[in-house]
Image: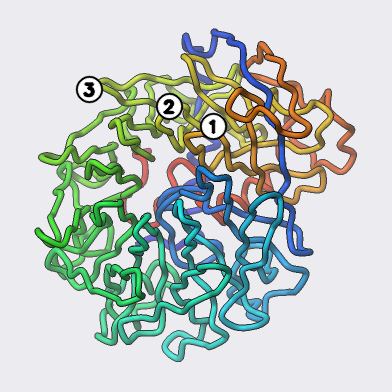
Amino acid sequence: MKSKASLWFIVMIFLLGVANPVPTAAQEQTKLHHHYKLIDVSTFGGPSSYLNAFVDGFAPRANGPFFGGARVLTGKGLLTGWADTSQSDPFPTFCFNPDCFVSHAFERHDGVVSDLGTLADGWSSATTWINESGDIVGLSENGLVDPRIGLPEVRAVRWSHGRIVDLGTLGGNQSAALAVNNHGQIAGLALNTIPDPFSIYDLLNYGSSNGTQTRAVLWDKDGRIEDLGTLGGPDAYALLVNDHGQVTGWSYTNSSPNAISGLPTFHPFLWDKRNGMQDLGSLGGTVAQAVNGLNERGEVVGATTLAGDMTHHPFLWDGKTLVDLGTLGGDSGEADWINDAGEVVGIAQYTVPCPNGLGGAHAFLWSNGAMTDLGSEDGVANSEAVFINSRTQIVGYSFSCDLSVVDALMWEGGSVVNLNSLISQTSAFHLFFTAFINDQGEIGAFGSLPDGDIHAFVLIPCDDDHPIVDGCDYSLVEASATVNVATRMPRANMPATASPGVSREAIRQLLQCVGSAPWRRRFGAQPQR
């Protein structure tokens, strides 16, 4: 098992080595687009604010638990995330956020951002998911130190009507709530008291083998906890739950470590009350690289390794079998989300060689049995599609090989557009990552300020579905996939980059915080090099 430091080195080496692609047809098209009103969520006095920005991504704490799920914005416009206060983290050797400020969970509704609080004054909390009823789940530090590891305890929590509730554990010291459906069922993980040298929670978060079993759990609407079992090994991890009560995640299938990953074999699973935990299998490898999406049809997407565990492919569980979605010609790829129509988006390597022999990576859409290369913006080598709504509007981001350019993108109607070209050109903010798009076309995104701070944003489309939005420009624009950010307001304090765009340090912090790097896995195989 690689250390987190070495993994970040691998991520950066990969990103720095990708080549410029041949422009695709999607890049060459232009289309009339609506403008967007940009709303800054701001902070609680500190430098940054955050959204749970990527399915199966990193949690807010620099070394903390890992999230699943990406629903941060409801159809009614309720947004949830977390924001820095001005207080320094009380545990500076193991900060909740990379910038080491205490942060609090928030809810934004009708233009008002409310502090949702924490389980203990002076400590941090963060949200992972919001359902359409406005129930919010996540995690909070409780002010105690776990005696096993000497680090802060974190507990799964639910916020309902502004009140925080500790959902408890299975007797252990840690838990996390990762998704909530519209019936109030919550999927997540909790530790029990059984010693386990392969405790996935402790190994990934703390690098400690002095752990107890990590179990996939489901809390009902009244807060009662149920251990969902495993596929035969000691640990399991529940990431997502749909409105039918189906739960997906991954589980160890045995207790014997493999030579490459250093962990027991683990597979994706689908659980329901009637059938229990079903093993979805693998594509020949021993590592369930990611479990990222679950729709209302019980279809699951993610990535798993191929034989030898040196490459991984995106998969779709279609209800009967695990389908290898393939790549765009390269070695590896990953499926990031699936909508209820069965349309899948993600990232896949293509075959254009780089100086060091690596291939580049593009966003893809998989539909009706075929993968389509969504391309990237002109002059930017790489892209990833993060989320797709029911209207086949897709959001994601592009990134250059050296991370000097990272831009928030949207794909719709057969074209790709840089979202910076659809907001006011007098804005000082640079949008570089999109987290979520709801069925009304409203987007949760990240942007950087001239001083390098990162804020969460809401983008409201100025269209017929939003007819009376103050400050909206309802004219249409023929927006290109590239935008000259240098034409905006002066950015005297913007850190130097090779070309206009967000600073590398801001990107580094976001990668650390929400796991938006395209090959961001925490263990097991990395892209072949």
What amino acid is labelled 3 in the image? Answer: Gly
Dot 1 or dot 3, earlier in sequence = 3
How far apart are the two marked residues, 2 and 3, measured between alpha carbons? 19 Å
Q: Which mark is first along the chain, 3 or 2?
A: 3
Q: Which residue bears the numbered disc 2?
A: 391
Residue 433, given in percent of the width and then of the height, sits at 59, 39
Q: Secondary structure at mark 3?
A: loop
- The residue that appears at 30% across and 51% down in the rendered structure is 242
| Residue 441: numbered disc | 1
Discs 2, 1 touching: Cβ within 8 Å? yes
- Quarter holding the C terminus is top left
Residue 218 falls left or right of residue 143? left
Amino acid type, mark 1: Gly
Residue bearing mark 3: 369
Q: Which mark is residue 99?
A: none
Label 2 crowd bin: few (<14), some (14–19), many (20+), radius 10 Å: some
Count neighbours of disc 1 (C-alpha within 10 A) and say few if under 14, some if 14 to 19, many if 20 or more. Answer: many
Q: Position of residue 161 (x, y in %)?
A: 55, 67
- In this rendering, does residue 9 appear at all? no
At horizontal 71% and vertical 50% (from top left) the residue drawn is: 111
Residue in front for this viewpoint, 472 or 386: 472
Find the residue positioned furthest to the front. 468
Under circle 2, the secondary element is loop
Q: Is residue 102 left or right of residue 293?
A: right
Q: Quadrant of the N terminus?
A: bottom left
Q: Looking at the image, is mark 2 or mark 1 earlier in the sequence?
A: 2
The mark closer to the camera, 2 or 3, is 2
Residue sitting at x 31%, y 26%: 366
Compare residues 434 and 307 and report the one nearer the observer.
Answer: 434
